[in-house]
Amino acid sequence: MDQALEENLMGALENVIDPELGIDIVNLGLVYGVDLDDEGIATVTMTLTAMGCPLAGHIEQDVKRVMEDIPEVKDTNVNIVWSPPWSKDRMSRYAKIALGIPD
């Protein structure tokens, strides 16, 4: 996958907003990677801020919805992982400022 396509996929994922925090999943540091295979299957490897997140299904559906808008993507798998664990250190400067977290 070329860099322009990867940036396009990550840009689409910036439209997925964590409903509890009001910040997108990319700036929150929840997305660990995105890949697209030769058949057009996108795999989004990500985590959540906490195990047992009640909105996990909602976030997963939003990820699939935004990926549908990318012409190269035929289907999307969301791979939720717990290692490495998420921490606020993964957040972008933008997200930290928006949430009032010191840098």
Image: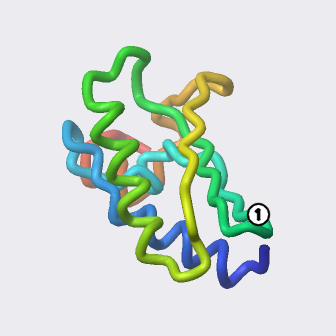
Q: Position of residue 73 (x, y in %)?
A: 58, 71
Residue 66 shown left or right of residue 38 in the figure: left
Q: For label 1, count other residues whose C-alpha is less than 10 Å away and answer few (under 14), some (14-19) or many (20+).
A: few
Q: Is residue 4 above or below residue 66?
A: below
Q: Quadrant of residue 38?
A: bottom right
Quadrant containing the C terminus is top left
Counting labels gives: 1
The color scheme shown is rainbow
- Which residue: 55% across, 60% down? 75
- Which residue: 35% across, 47% down? 61
- Residue highlighted by disc 1: 37
- Which residue: 33% across, 53% down? 62
For badge 1, the amino acid type reads: Asp
Q: Nearer the viewer, residue 62 or 84?
A: 62
Q: Nearer the viewer, residue 59 or 39?
A: 39
Q: Nearer the viewer, residue 8 or 68?
A: 68
- Which residue: 50% across, 77% down? 70
Q: Is residue 22 above or below residue 41?
A: above
Residue 101 shown left or right of residue 12 in the figure: left
Q: In what element is the residue under mark 1?
A: loop
Q: Position of residue 49 (x, y in %)?
A: 41, 29
Q: Nearer the viewer, residue 75 or 60?
A: 75
Q: Is residue 59 above or below residue 39?
A: above
Q: Position of residue 23 (x, y in %)?
A: 29, 52
Q: Quadrant of residue 101?
A: top left
Residue 39 shown left or right of residue 58 in the figure: right
Quadrant containing the N terminus is bottom right
